[in-house]
């Protein structure tokens, strides 16, 4: 019986014990459901449809979040915008994770000139403010959503290189890695089965945090006019458009901002929860 | 030597790559089939480096500069990495000093042991049983549960047993043990020594046991090599060395051991001074500065290794005469 207990007490068990983790997961889940709804067109109105008779209406039973200066339904646009934001940030972070973790782990493990090269190149990327670098890339690539995703992905890759490389440097000096070598394990096996699982935790936490930053970066790019192009809604673009209207039509600004806040806070809380659940030193029971 | 040779180290020299400093100098020793050989020396005397060079696993910045390591007709120093990898764990295995960090903390034990088999040819249905059999041989209770447990659920002694099981899994012909009992309680030490001794006899496995503690190896090994400042200063059978040490350093080491027969008011003797760095020895006997028998010659010449029958000594003025 006891054997079973040990088995099932995985990371999930510890994650569910963390309040911030559970709250964060619920917030993110709501936002994901909302985004999925818009994929299947389950929005009250078409997000780009203009209701000329109902320009700048406050929240009501018909238009839950009100309408904007073109008479478009803010609620439908917010859902659609959330979907855009999540699509771009998930794509961007996936790219950054795959590239960053691969190069980071290899750099840490192989060392020598390869490490020097990877570290220096990522230092160069670090030297630019994220939004500025992303701006430059988007400006040269184009405005499609995948261009934005690519730009954000490239900008975030060095973060993952750092996060993956650091722990590898520690882990590869541990006795169990030396012993793996002494017992004749191949380098590939050591990397895959013995180093990667030991550096996994900080990477997962970094993914959750980067997702929230990527949403902010995407919003920032759209706000500056280089992300999603009108009339397609994006949370950042909506905030940007709402700026001159805020004084007399608060709902156009508040609701998209609120959604950005909820998803960013949610992802940060998920990051906290994951950190607690995956760190063996913090789970003491 | 009666047994056929398994491993023969000849004139091994190890030095740092940059700003060359000699760390190990002209080390030669043999290990016969089924024989247990001990290497005794202080920290920094080069005993661990000598062992690691056998496996081609010297730390970065350190390299073999001379000599040969012959294992079953193959010079291990000339093999490439992949050829060496096949020998490691399979034909030559090693156990380490600190069992607390020697197991992967995020991998279940059963899986970790199977990894050894998987990295040398692959797992089949019998592998699980092979692992179980070894775990119970090394005295792990409730083997099935242990296979599903993580390393932190075991004590240091248990982990060292697991390490031994891991090393023995592929029935290596040579086991290198680098002070595997130093981190353990004295009572656990005895258990581990007994365990290794028994496992060795059962398999007719050769062993190279590295330690700084003469007391540990006394009942464990057949032959002893005493290392000092990167050289082997004396070698011989355990009885010879314990009964009639020839090198003043060996004699000093022995007299610093507590005995059960001595009156308990007696103070233990210690060797005054600190060990010389191997690269500073130069043209002298490394031990000369601390030696009560040293004369002018000891400070200006390297004493040659004099081999007689089964033993050797590198000293101009050995105890008991030449």
Image: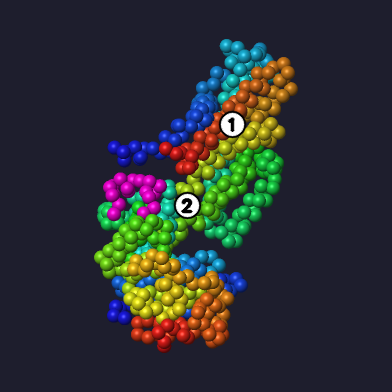
Q: Is residue B277 magenta?
A: no
Q: Is residue A195 above or below residue A262?
A: below
Highlighted range, magenta: B139-157
**Left or right: A110 as drawn, with respect to B179:** right
Find residue A57 and report its horizontal and vertical position in percent. Answer: 66, 13
Q: Chain of mark 2?
A: A
Q: In the structure shown, which secondary structural element does the residue marked by tag 1 occupy?
A: helix
The residue identified by callout 1 is A264
Mark 1 or mark 2, earlier in chain: 2
Q: Quadrant of the N terminus of chain B?
A: bottom left
* A25 sits to left or right of A71: left
> Which residue occupies 56% across, 59% down?
A111
A192 sits left or right of B260 in the view = right
Where's residue A37, x and y in %?
Answer: 51, 25
Residue B151 visible from this viewpoint: yes
Please tell me which residue is depicted at 61% across the width and 24% down the height of the picture.
A258
Location of residue B257 (image quadrant): bottom left
Q: Which mark is residue A195?
A: 2
Q: Is residue B207 something one can see in this rendering?
A: no
Q: Nearer the viewer, residue B197 or A221?
A: B197
Q: Position of residue A131 (x, y in %)?
A: 68, 39
Q: Nearer the viewer, mark 1 or mark 2?
A: 2
């Amino acid at each position: 019986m006891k054997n079973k207990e040990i088995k099932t007490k995985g990371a999930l068990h510890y994650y569910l014990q963390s309040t911030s983790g559970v709250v964060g997961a619920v917030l993110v889940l709501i936002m994901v459901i909302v985004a999925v709804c818009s994929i299947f067109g389950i929005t009250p109105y078409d997000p780009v449809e203009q209701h000329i008779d109902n320009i700048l209406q406050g929240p009501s039973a018909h238009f839950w979040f009100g309408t904007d200066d073109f008479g478009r339904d803010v609620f439908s646009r917010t859902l659609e915008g959330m979907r855009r934001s999540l699509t771009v940030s998930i794509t961007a972070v996936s790219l950054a994770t795959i590239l960053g973790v691969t190069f980071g782990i290899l750099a840490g493990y192989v060392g020598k000139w390869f490490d020097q090269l990877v570290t220096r190149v990522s230092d160069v990327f670090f030297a630019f403010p994220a939004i500025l670098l992303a701006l430059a890339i988007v400006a040269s690539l184009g405005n499609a959503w995948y261009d934005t995703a690519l730009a954000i992905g490239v900008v975030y890759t060095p973060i993952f290189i750092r996060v993956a490389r650091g722990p590898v440097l520690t882990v590869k000096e541990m006795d169990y890695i030396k012993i793996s070598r002494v017992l004749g394990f191949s380098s590939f096996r050591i990397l895959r089965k013995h180093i990667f699982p030991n550096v996994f935790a900080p990477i997962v936490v970094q993914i959750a945090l980067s997702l929230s930053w990527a949403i902010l970066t995407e919003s920032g790019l759209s706000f500056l006019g280089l992300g999603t192009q009108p009339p397609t809604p994006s949370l950042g673009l909506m905030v940007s458009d709402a700026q001159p209207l805020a004084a007399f039509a608060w709902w156009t600004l508040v609701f998209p901002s609120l959604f950005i806040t909820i998803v960013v806070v949610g992802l940060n809380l998920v990051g906290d929860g994951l950190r607690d659940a995956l760190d063996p030193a913090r789970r003491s029971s | 030597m009666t047994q056929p040779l398994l491993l023969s180290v000849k004139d091994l020299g190890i030095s740092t790559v940059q700003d060359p400093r000699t760390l190990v100098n002209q080390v030669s020793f043999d290990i016969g089939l089924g024989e247990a050989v001990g290497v005794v020396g202080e920290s920094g005397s080069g005993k661990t480096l000598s062992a690691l060079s056998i496996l081609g696993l010297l730390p970065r910045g350190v390299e073999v500069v001379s000599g040969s390591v012959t294992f079953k007709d193959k010079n291990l120093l000339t093999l490439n990495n992949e050829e060496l990898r096949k020998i490691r764990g399979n034909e030559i295995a090693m156990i380490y000093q600190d069992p607390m960090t020697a197991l992967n903390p995020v991998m279940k034990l059963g899986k970790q042991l199977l990894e050894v088999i998987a990295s040398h040819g692959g797992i089949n249905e019998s592998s699980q049983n092979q692992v179980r059999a070894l775990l119970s041989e090394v005295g792990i209770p409730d083997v099935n549960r242990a296979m599903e447990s993580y390393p932190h659920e075991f004590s240091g002694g248990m982990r060292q047993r697991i390490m031994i099981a891991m090393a023995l899994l592929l029935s290596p012909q040579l086991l290198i043990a680098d002070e595997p009992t130093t981190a353990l309680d004295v009572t656990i030490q005895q258990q581990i020594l007994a365990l290794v001794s028994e496992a060795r006899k059962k398999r007719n496995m050769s062993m190279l046991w590295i330690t700084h503690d003469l007391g540990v190896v006394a009942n464990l090994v057949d032959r002893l090599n005493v290392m000092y400042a990167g050289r082997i200063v004396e070698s011989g059978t355990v009885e010879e060395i314990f009964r009639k040490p020839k090198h003043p350093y060996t004699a000093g080491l022995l007299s610093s051991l507590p005995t059960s027969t001595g009156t308990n008011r007696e103070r233990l003797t210690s060797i005054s001074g600190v060990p010389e760095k191997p690269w500073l020895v130069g043209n002298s006997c490394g031990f000369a500065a601390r030696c009560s028998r040293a004369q002018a010659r000891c400070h200006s010449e390297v004493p040659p290794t004099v081999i007689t029958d089964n033993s050797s000594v590198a000293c101009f003025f050995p105890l008991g005469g030449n």
